[in-house]
Every structure is written in C-alpha cells, then in structure tokens.
Amino acid sequence: MLALLLTLQRRGRATATELATELEVSVRTLYRDVAALMAAGVPVWTEPGPNGGIRLVEGWRTRLDGLTADEATALFLSGAPQALTDLGLATVAVSARAKVDATLPVELRGRASRIRERFLLDAPGWFSRPEPLDALPATAEAVWTGHRLDIRYGDGAASRRVDPLGLILKSGTWYLIARHRGAPKTYRLSRIHRAEVRPETFVRPEDFDLAAWWARSSAEFDRSLLTWPCRVRLSPRAYKRLPHLVPHDAVRRMLDDAGPPDADGWRTVDLQLESEDVAVDQLTGLGDGVEVIEPLALRHRLHTVGTRMAALNAPKLGFL
C-alpha cells in the first residue's frame, strides 16, 4: 500500500489496470488496497468512465520525505541486519525507519510494525564465522561513487586496478564484482588485503545488470566444479538426501534427469562430481542407500570404506 501511495503521488492519475501492472498485483488486489488507503485516511479519489482513473485529491501529498542518501540506502538493506552493520549503516537505518513510521497513516504504521515483529531475514549460513572485512569501507565507497580502485588480492598477489561494478552478499560472504582488463570478475572481500580508492572515475557499462551477471556467473561456476562423471543407483532416501550432501543446482538437475524408479524404488543417476576423492566422501554419507555402477575404481573405494566401517563398528565380545 505504501508503494501504491507513492506511485499515485508520482503519476498523478492512472487506471486500475496500469497501477496493477506496475505494482505486479491483480486488479482485484489493487482495488482492495485502494479501499484500505481510504480507510487509513488517505484522500484517494476514483473516477469512472473512459477518462477516469485513480488519483490523490488535488494538492494532497504524503509527508514521507526528508530521507538522507544513507537513510534511503539503509531502507533498501533493512532486511539484512549484518549487511547494514558491515557497511556502517545500522544507525542510519534506525533513523530512516523512524522517519517513515512518523509519516505513515496509522493503519500502514501498524502493518509496518507487525512486519518487523514477525519477519526477520538472517542471511549468513549456520556455523559460519565472520570474515575479515578491512577492505569493505573503501570498496563500498568506490562502488557508490564510481571511482577506480587499487586492490591487493590473495596471498602475495600484485596490486590490481579495477573498476568496481557492485557488491554482493551471498550467505554471509561479501563479494566485489569489478572489471579488470575489460571483463567483470568476482573477488572475495576477505581476500582483499588492501583497497585504495583512486581519484579518477570510470564509465560504467550501460548494459551491465548486476543481478543477471551474478546469476550467470554463479551457474557457470557451479558447473565448472563438476567435471568427474560417475553412475550410481540411489535408494529413495538417498535420492532425497544427495542434494544436501552435494549442494549444487547442477546436481539437482542431474537428479531431475534420472529415469523412473525400479520395482524397489531405486533410481539410476548419471552424476558429475568434483573428483574421485570428493565423490568418495560425499557418497559415503549416503550409507547403504547408494550402489556405484561405474567407474569400478569408485565402487572399490566405497567397498573399502564400508568394510573398514563395519570392522570398526562390529559388536564387541559380550555385547549384542
């Protein structure tokens, strides 16, 4: 409803269909939200007919203004508390939310409060330790302002001059996407030992879409790790468990491509894993729910692991 209010203020007048399309809701939902705005005291006016539409009463404007640039940024990141802390925006986020709360109609203010009480986005994964982020302040400054950046990346690496295109927070880990020698590359922030903002700016590629580039890059990286083929039979339980042991989207697609289950419910699956050693560790976690068909070397290694586990865990004398 806040998006609807600000859209009406920006556009002046629009049809229900135009508003529903822009806000990605159904026309029925839009009319329900218009009624809720009216009930909240917002002077929304609906006019029937071919030249009609939905608009705010002439001269009325919301008092939702006065946000600083940092506060506006913090609002966009308010679903990720750790990101705000890393970027030094935790305090201004509180200020931004206070300004928004003070200017919302009572009904919308209550909804915002209920959202904060009932929903929290906790981005970092379980059992993860915070990484050193000494380079983040300078890197973020260069990203915001469009200045070139000198970084020292990795152990003993030489300095690189890059054009910082964006920052990504993935499962609690920060990455810098920067153009180096004409091509965008990914740099893990914790491996940047020094970052210095250059005085000169750069021209950002007009066709660069950070979200689209990250999606393609992540998929390519996922596939690049899985180059070692094997064929296995999986029990129903192992079939469901494998994606948790090998958390790659490509592996999920391999499972989807498997044939139908046999009479016992087992499926034959062609997999691509990282290496034979990694395959042994990952498939061992499936216990007696996996049978290796090929290669034979992997089958023999799983047999050896199983034999050793059986010997180590055999019942002791006097115990069943």
Image (cartoon, rainbow, N blue to C red):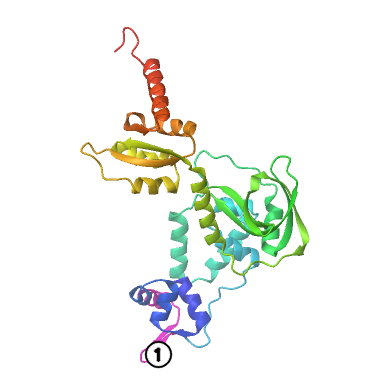
Query: In this rendering, does residue 167 appear at all?
Result: yes
Query: Quick check: 168 above or below 112?
Result: above
* Residue identifier under label 1: 52
* Image coordinates for residue 227, horizontal then vertical, percent: 48, 42
Quarter assignment of residue 305 = top left
- Residue 276 among those drawn in magenta: no
Residue at the extreme left of the image, as rendered: 263
Pick whichever, 110 or 264, lies toward us.
Answer: 264
* Image coordinates for residue 232, horizontal then vertical, percent: 35, 36
- Residue 51 among those drawn in magenta: yes
**Structural crowding at the residue carrying mark 1, measured as other residues with C-alpha within 10 Å and reported as few (<14), some (14–19) or many (≥20):** some
Pick whichever, 115 or 81, lies toward us.
Answer: 81
Quarter assignment of residue 286 = top left
Quarter assignment of residue 63 = bottom right
Question: What amino acid is labelled 1 in the image?
Answer: Gly
Residue at the extreme right of the image, as rendered: 199
Q: Is residue 57 left or right of residue 165?
A: left
Which corner quadrant holds the N terminus? bottom left
Question: Residue at point 47% right, 63% down?
Answer: 112
In the image, the segment drawn in magenta is 32-56
Q: Is residue 201 left or right of residue 72?
A: right
Which corner quadrant holds the C terminus? top left
Q: Is residue 282 left or right of residue 91?
A: left
* Image coordinates for residue 61, horizontal then vertical, percent: 53, 81
Query: Quick check: 148 above or below 40?
Result: above
Q: Is residue 1 left or right of residue 238?
A: right
* Image coordinates for residue 51, horizontal then vertical, percent: 40, 92
SS type, badge 1: loop
Question: Residue at point 36% right, 45% down?
Answer: 255
Q: How many marks?
A: 1
Query: In this rendering, does residue 56 appear at all?
Result: no
Question: Residue at point 35% right, 10% down?
Answer: 316
